[in-house]
Amino acid sequence: MKGLSYTWKTLLPFLAIVLIALVCSNILIARSIDQFITHNWEQNLLQQARLYADSASSLIQAGSPYTGVDEIAKSHPSDIRVTILLTDGTVIGDSTIDPAKVENQIFFPEVKAALKGKEGIDTRQSVSLKTGLLFAAVPIQSGGQVIGVARTSIPMSAMDAEVRNIRNINWIILGITLVVTGLLAVVLSAPGINPLRKLTRQVDLISSTGEFTPLRVSLGHDEISTLTMSFNRLISDLNQQITQLGSEQAILGSVLSNMSDGVIIVSPEGNVKLINQAAIRLFNVAGDISREKTLIEVTRLYQLVEIWKKSLATGETQTTTLELLPDNNYVQVIASPLGASFPGVTLLLAQDLTRLRKLETVRRDFVQNVSHALDTPLSSLKTLAESLQSGKIQDNELAPQILTRMNIEIDKMLQIVHELLELARIETGKTPFEFRPVQPKEIVLPAIERMKDQAERASLDLNTQLEENLPPVLADALRMQEVLINLIHNAIKFTPSGGKVTVKVEKRDKFVQFCVEDTGIGIKPADLDRIFERFYRSDRTINSGGTGLGLSIAKHTIEAHQGKIWAESEPGRGATFFFTIPVVE
Ligand code: ADP
């Protein structure tokens, strides 16, 4: 029954019951038919015997040789055998054979019953005919006396053929009834089974497409409609949960991909189950990551594998810092086991410490640079003060010179402190800028005027190229002049005599671009990014006498004007500094 469809599971027991009922009734009917046919034949034989008894009565009374009796018997046209006997059992007439050849019949039960004046019936094997026979015997009476017996018989085979025929018809009827019942059952069960089939098909469709669409409900209050409605409720619950899961997953996914920290989830076998964009970027992961790969295949960093193994073995959080090539980035990796909910699964969290490290270096450099910048003038001051103390103060010639030198050193220190304070004020937004529409030449011409003599002393050609009809810019004119002066000052400082310094101004979209171009020593590409940092000075210019703060102040000033500042250079062939300021709209 297990492998059978629901239709057959319901139909088969029903058909079995019908079959058993039909077979039983058929057996009963067959038995009744048997009895009916036998009884019919018995009555028929008795009836025939009675007729012969009547006809033979007067002939027997007439006495021997009873030839008339045998003639009557032999005149019988049918299959029925007729035998006429005297009361002593002697056969005096027989429809089939010569009476003289027939043995005495007195001991047969039907004959005995007839001799007692009753009608007798018996079935037995005939010795002479070698076949089963049905016998019926009636007394031949005269004046109330039994004077003989008239007996009829018929072979059972005649009766059996009739019984067999009727039985066969009965079995055929049974077969037809069974087939018709089966067909009717299939047809009648269809309204119940078809909706189930439909339901199955729709559910199959859902599982093959993965789309949880509601099933079409057949209106009604039957079990199938109730089942369909329950199913639809389940689908709508599932849909809700899937949507919720989907949105939670989407949130998690976007959190993971927008995180600045790298996340890698590693399975107990060492395969990368998940890696976010930050980790891909940090570890320079190349190639296809859609297929599950091992940690070493994905990151090619044995230190990561080691920390993962250590965390897996100890079940504890492990931390390490890696320096990654080629950019010398510093990455801190924390490996933590995810615990009981995901046994053996490890979370690798990678934080980029490069910026922090850089800031740390800048801070250290800053302290070092301030100390260094103040050290030189302070040491000079100390030496000068000591020489005054050691009696030079009495020396009328030397004393004023020493004091003048002391004054110069104090000025240098004041300059450093002043620039540092200025930078700190700009950085913290405490510098009051006076923005107003300014013509670019209001910035350029005073700066050139200020630096003209210095350029001349350095035997440099300082010239300007101002585009015509430049629009006004929104700026604090004095501060812009300071920025430009600083750039020209640097250009003069780092350009050997005979060189050229050009100040160009032109319009670029919504900005006016200022540029100071020199033909000096230039800047190495590695220094280009760093010259705007506080105190940064390239190796080649370390003894130029500057503080290393000028460009940093310039950068902050330009940024406060919503502009940009940058430098381009070809070492040995000069440097060009650019800055932009937005035009007045
Ligand atoms: P400094 O007071 O040392 O000039 P800046 O901040 O103005 O400080 O400049 C920082 C560094 O940038 C300089 O020390 C120098 O190494 C480099 N620099 C600036 N301008 C030029 C230039 N025109 N040519 C070459 N190097 C320059």
Image (spheres, helix red, strand yellow):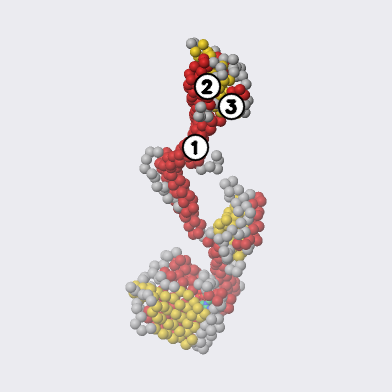
Q: Secondary structure at mark 1?
A: helix
For the residue marked with disc 2, what is the amino acid?
Gly
Pick the residue in front: 580 or 48.
Answer: 48
Numbered circle sitting on residue 172: 1
Task: Tell me the CA gap for discs 3 and 2.
Answer: 15 Å
In the image, residue 399 sits, relative to residue 87, either above or below, namely below
Q: Secondary structure at mark 2?
A: helix
Q: Secondary structure at mark 3?
A: loop
**Res 292 quadrant in image:** bottom right
Query: Can residue 317 be seen by looking at this rendering?
Result: no
Numbered circle sitting on residue 60: none
Task: Tell me the CA gap for discs 3 and 1.
Answer: 41 Å
Q: Which residue is mark 3?
A: 97
Horizontally, residue 218 falls left or right of residue 73, namely left
Query: Can residue 62 be seen by looking at this rendering?
Result: yes
Residue drawn at (51%, 38%) of the image: 12
For the residue marked with disc 3, what is the amino acid?
Ile
Pick the residue in front: 519 or 434.
Answer: 519
Badge 3: how crowded within 10 Å, few (<14), some, or many (20+)? few
Tell me which label, 3 or 1, sits earlier in the chain: 3
In the image, residue 218 sits, relative to residue 492, either above or below, namely above
Q: Quadrant of the C terminus?
A: bottom left
